[in-house]
């Protein structure tokens, strides 16, 4: 074998071995004291954080181990001494910058049950929304450590259409602070549709609108099947958050003889025709969600 | 209620005391407090309730917030009070001991105000009983329209509020004896009291609207347990809810009649037969729910989840008789429309209780897997069964509007349904910044007692995410779903006396196409989000003969034919520098439906001459502008804001049969709300800051149906109607506030 080739081969092997040794170096835990030498402010703030308190109380994780519980062992990162060009610098895990799955796995170490039980495979998980997009462990606001000042602002980052809807004239008291997105939805996933915090839309609505729960002697069947047949829960231009103005909403399903099929027109509005004026159809059919009266088949009583 | 509330507070107090006593005596206690107190001055034109729909805006001293936090060892106690002494006030006590024991007690008031100035000629002589003076009742029946309206106007009892408030007291306890076990228990009592507008009519031409009294008591409690360890989670829950309506019925005078009378079939049109009306209000009901949840991590990044929920709702309140009209008896009219018995006697009912019961069984099962980092697979199964166990009863007839007996057997059908969904999904990261997702699902629905008994909907959804750079996301989504109907029962429609061509939109065949695109960018001082979406629902006739085999009937579909939506939004946040920030938001939405109907007199007629087709259009503009300036003279933060919410509803008659030629569309409706806010926060000392605020709100409404609602209306020929006159009105409001915020 020619000498030049041998030298080349040995040199290359040495280089590969050196590189491989460096890459294969395993980081080890160094403790929060080491982290604080560079991240003093963050560490001090973290002492007041619910995580810091819960780690020790519930998980028997002392403060010294708390940083590396989420960020991973930091010996190589600390060894880089702030030199970002050093590949060891990037070995520390930053959930805020990591991929969604990796970031979420960090949080799921502890937050796998309860509200997060159905996270995996949920809409947000599938759409690669990471925990860090809504929560900020170090600088979050409120008890839930939201990334934005309020829960609504956090959700509206992506759901801007809903931001417009909750401000419509017929609305639930979300803007007034009495309800939040999480009053109805579990952003961490739920078994039901639309991440609702109940088996179905109706089950959720009945939690506040118990008077509509019934069951009734006479059921209004599309109502029993879904409240969303007629209502827009995020807000509407139409009274009672209806998806279209009464009488026309009702006339989408009722064409029968006499008045349901009547064409009510401009003149009728000006003359306060009682089928379209004020509460329109529900001037008479007021038990529209169901009736328990023997003469209530048409929801008149 | 007072006893319950006292018990709740005592329980919370005992829990707090127990936690504090359990703490080692030498632990240092830190107490932090915060208060916002000040003075508010408001001026509002008119007395429109909309300004305070969900919360009082007082004129005078206000205590906006008080918060106290006490920490001793591993125990935290927090007390928070908001909007004290206002309709929407709330209080909360939270005790957290070592994150293992959490006790929470809260009191929350949520008002909903509809009107400050409703009017009625009726006087509520007892809860749910509305009377008109006897001297007047007989005269209204004989009065012509003008006289009727004048008499009713003189009976006006003066302006009254219309609205209710839900007061909820709640105590909850959460105990985590170990890292893997957690128990929870909560109890809530809610009271809902007030009034709301309720139609209580006597006939086609005699609408009456009353302030229905609301006096509800709701008790609910929940118990839960959870086990969480080594990738396995198990959860159990039981919930109970009881609804009680302390005012079971509403009885009200008929101004047109002082003594009951029965009339023949058409007698209910004028609504002048019965001396009174009676209606059953929301019946008491009870609900139970048991749930089991489970999740387990499996190899290859997989996870399986399951949930099972069994719920029962029941109601068994005594039924009222067919009518309060004592004159509807056998032989009262000598016509075929005679009642077979005394309709006001409850003993003539085939049953004295509804015996209503529904069981809701819901099951969800799912498996997701990340066999390797770039691939996610999922399978989901969902089943919901609404089983209606309510007794099916045949009534020999009914009394319409308390006016006249209508014979002929009618039966309450126990409507029930079952929905089953199977869905598979896959997500793949093609290259680092690009991922795609695909899902396909089929949902089957089976129903009893509706014209569509079997239905299937197939949905295909595709998404793509592109992250070309850090903080930059482009997301696209497309959904196509096809709903198919296996069988359509025209006879069911006929039983309801509907056109054979009618296809109800929640049952009919439908093709939905929906697409959306969003762009989110967060880079340095700029946060930008753009989104847009389109939706088109095309409703189709499906199986079933649209003509029902009747010669002369057009082969035409009726009902909702099409539903479209489009939406676009822009949300911008810009930090001009470290002191100045600007925000802007705009959202536009357009929702429109196309529906066809047919105006029939006494006989169903699908010949097209009296067809009419209308398009409903709701358009929305929502916008906001904000400017934040921080550290002005190193002391003050200032915020300027403008918010606009405008909506417009239109109807356009787009196709009219020959019988409707030249008829005009209904007028548009329009609502505009604008807010201008200025807030400044001035730091006086490290603990004290002074807040100055100004709000100007302008509300303009144009709605022919709810503006200018009179107490009595005889404007439409042949009708005399009594309303609550709770009209929607424009208003301007100015609110100035001076607040002191102190933290110590």
Image (cartoon, rainbow, N blue to C red):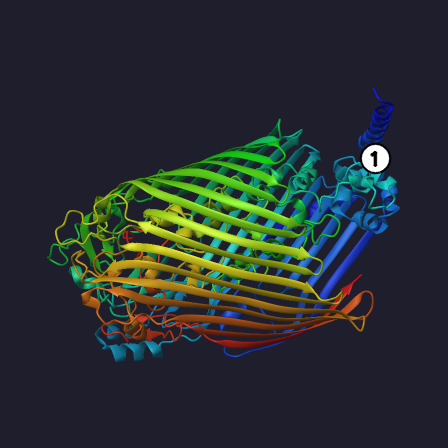
Judge whether B503 appears above or below B224 on screen.
below
Q: Quadrant of residue B134?
A: bottom left
Residue under the image location 37 percent in, 65 percent down = B210
Is residue B192 found left or right of A255 in the rendered image?
Answer: right
Quarter-of-image position of residue A71: top right
Mark 1 secondary-structure assignment: loop
Q: Out of B421 and B474, give the one closest to the viewer.
A: B474
Q: Identify the residue shown where x is 38% and y is 67%.
A: B650
- Where, quadrant-wise, is the C terminus of chain B in this rendering? bottom right
For this orientation, the residue located farthest to the top is A1
Towards the viewer: B111 or B338: B111
Vertical arrangement, residue A257 with respect to residue A86, above or below: below
Residue visible at 74% across and 52% down?
A: A139
Rendered location of residue A186, percent (x, y): 57, 46
- Residue B443 in the image: above or below residue B561: above
Chain of the residue displaying label 1: A
Q: Position of residue A54 (x, y in %)?
A: 75, 41
| Image position of A41 (left or right of B418) | right
Residue A6 screen position, x and y as percent:
85, 23
Q: Residue at x 64, y 68 (%)?
A: B626
Neighbourhood count class around disc 1 (C-alpha, 10 Å): few under 14, some 14–19, many 20 upward: some
| Residue highlighted by disc 1 | A29
Q: Quadrant of residue B196?
A: bottom left
Residue B640, position as x, y percentages in the image = 66, 72
Would residue B278 be found to the left or right of residue A86 on screen? left
């Amino acid at each position: 074998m020619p000498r030049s080739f041998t030298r080349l081969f040995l040199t290359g092997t040495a280089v590969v071995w050196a590189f491989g040794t460096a890459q294969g170096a395993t980081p080890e835990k160094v403790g929060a004291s080491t982290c604080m030498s560079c991240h003093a402010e963050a560490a001090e703030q973290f002492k007041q954080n619910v995580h810091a308190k819960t780690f020790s109380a519930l998980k028997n994780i002392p403060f010294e181990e708390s940083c590396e519980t989420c960020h991973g062992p930091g010996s190589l990162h600390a060894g880089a001494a702030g030199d970002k060009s050093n590949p060891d610098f990037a070995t520390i895990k930053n959930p805020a910058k990591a991929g969604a799955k990796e970031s979420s796995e960090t949080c799921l170490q502890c937050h796998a049950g309860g509200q997060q039980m159905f996270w995996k495979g949920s809409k947000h998980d599938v759409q690669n929304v990471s925990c860090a997009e809504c929560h900020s462990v170090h600088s979050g606001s409120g008890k839930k450590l939201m990334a934005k000042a309020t829960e609504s602002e956090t959700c509206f980052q992506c759901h801007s259409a809903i931001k417009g809807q909750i401000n419509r004239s017929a609305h639930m008291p979300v803007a007034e602070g009495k309800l939040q997105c999480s009053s109805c939805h579990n952003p961490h996933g739920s078994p039901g549709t639309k991440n609702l915090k109940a088996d179905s839309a109706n089950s959720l609505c009945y939690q506040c609108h118990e008077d509509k729960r019934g069951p009734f002697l006479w059921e209004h069947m599309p109502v029993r099947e879904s409240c969303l047949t007629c209502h827009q829960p995020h807000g509407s231009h139409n009274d009672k958050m209806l998806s279209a103005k009464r009488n026309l909403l009702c006339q989408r399903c009722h064409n029968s003889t006499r008045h349901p099929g009547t064409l009510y027109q401009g003149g009728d509005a000006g003359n306060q025709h009682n089928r379209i004026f004020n509460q329109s159809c529900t001037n008479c059919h007021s038990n529209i969600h169901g009736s328990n009266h023997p003469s209530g088949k048409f929801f008149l009583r | 209620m007072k006893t319950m509330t006292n018990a709740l507070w005592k329980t919370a107090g005992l829990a707090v005391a127990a936690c504090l006593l359990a703490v080692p005596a030498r632990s240092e206690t830190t107490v932090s407090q915060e208060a916002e107190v000040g003075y508010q001055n408001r001026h509002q034109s008119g007395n429109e309730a909309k300004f305070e729909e969900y919360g009082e805006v007082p004129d005078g001293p206000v205590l906006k917030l008080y918060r106290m936090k006490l920490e001793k060892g591993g125990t935290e106690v927090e007390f928070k009070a908001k909007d004290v002494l206002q309709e929407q006030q709330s209080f909360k006590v939270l005790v957290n001991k070592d994150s293992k024991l959490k006790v929470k007690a809260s009191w929350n008031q949520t008002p909903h105000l509809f009107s400050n100035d409703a009017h009625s000629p009726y006087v509520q002589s007892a809860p749910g009983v509305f009377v008109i003076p006897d001297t007047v009742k007989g005269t209204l029946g004989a009065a012509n329209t003008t006289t009727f309206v004048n008499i009713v106007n003189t009976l006006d009892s003066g302006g009254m509020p219309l609205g209710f408030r839900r007061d909820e007291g709640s105590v909850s306890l959460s105990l985590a004896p170990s890292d893997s076990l957690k128990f929870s228990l909560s109890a809530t009592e809610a009271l809902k009291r007030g009034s709301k507008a309720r139609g209580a009519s006597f006939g086609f031409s005699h609408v009456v609207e009353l302030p229905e009294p609301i006096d509800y008591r709701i008790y609910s409690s929940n118990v839960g347990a959870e086990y969480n360890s080594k990738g396995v989670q198990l959860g159990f829950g039981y919930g109970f809810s009881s609804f009680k309506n302390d005012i079971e019925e509403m009885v009200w005078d008929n101004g047109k009649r002082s003594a009951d009378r029965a009339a023949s079939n058409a007698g209910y049109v004028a609504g002048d037969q019965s001396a009174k009306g009676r209606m059953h209000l929301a019946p008491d009901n009870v609900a139970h729910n048991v749930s089991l949840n489970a999740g387990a991590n499996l190899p290859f990044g997989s996870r399986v989840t399951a949930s099972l929920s069994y719920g029962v709702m029941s109601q068994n309140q005594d039924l009222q008789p067919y009518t309060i009209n004592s004159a509807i008896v056998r032989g009262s009219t000598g016509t075929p429309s005679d009642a077979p018995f005394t309709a006001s006697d409850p003993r003539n009912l085939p049953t004295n209780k509804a015996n209503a019961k529904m069981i809701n069984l819901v099951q969800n099962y799912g498996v997701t897997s990340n066999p390797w980092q770039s691939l996610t697979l999922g399978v989901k199964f969902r089943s919901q069964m609404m089983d209606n166990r309510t007794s099916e009863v045949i009534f020999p007839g009914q009394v319409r509007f308390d006016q006249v007996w209508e014979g002929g057997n009618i039966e309450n059908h126990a409507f029930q349904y079952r929905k089953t969904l199977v869905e598979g999904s896959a997500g793949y990261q093609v290259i680092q910044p690009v991922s795609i997702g695909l899902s396909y699902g089929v949902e089957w629905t089976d129903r009893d007692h509706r014209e569509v008994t079997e239905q299937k909907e197939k949905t295909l959804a595709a998404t793509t995410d592109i992250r070309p750079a850090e903080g930059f996301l482009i997301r696209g989504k497309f959904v196509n779903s096809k709903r198919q109907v296996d069988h359509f029962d025209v006879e069911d429609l006929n039983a309801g006396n509907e056109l054979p061509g009618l296809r109800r939109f929640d049952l009919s065949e439908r093709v939905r196409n929906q697409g959306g695109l969003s762009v989110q960018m967060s880079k340095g001082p700029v946060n930008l989000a753009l989104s847009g979406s389109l939706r088109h629902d095309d409703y189709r006739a499906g199986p079933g003969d649209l003509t029902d085999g009747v010669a002369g009937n057009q082969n035409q579909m009726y009902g909702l034919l099409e539903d479209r939506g489009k939406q676009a939004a822009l949300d911008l946040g810009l930090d001009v520098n470290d002191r100045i920030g600007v925000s802007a938001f705009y959202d536009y939405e357009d929702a429109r439906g196309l529906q066809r109907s047919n105006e029939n007199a006494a006989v169903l007629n699908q010949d097209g001459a009296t067809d009419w087709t209308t398009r409903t259009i709701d358009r929305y503009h929502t916008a906001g502008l904000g400017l934040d300036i921080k550290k002005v003279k190193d002391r003050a933060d200032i915020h300027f804001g403008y918010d606009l919410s405008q909506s417009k509803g239109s109807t356009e008659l787009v196709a009219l049969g020959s019988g409707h030629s030249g008829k005009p569309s209904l007028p548009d409706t329009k609502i505009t709300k604008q807010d201008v806010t200025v807030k400044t926060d001035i730091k006086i000392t490290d603990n004290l800051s002074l807040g100055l605020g100004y709000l100007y709100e302008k509300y303009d409404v144009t709605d022919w149906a709810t503006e200018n609602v009179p107490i009595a209306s005889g404007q439409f020929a042949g009708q005399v109607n009594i309303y609550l006159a709770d009209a929607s009105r424009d208003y301007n409001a100015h609110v100035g506030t001076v607040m002191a915020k102190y933290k110590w």
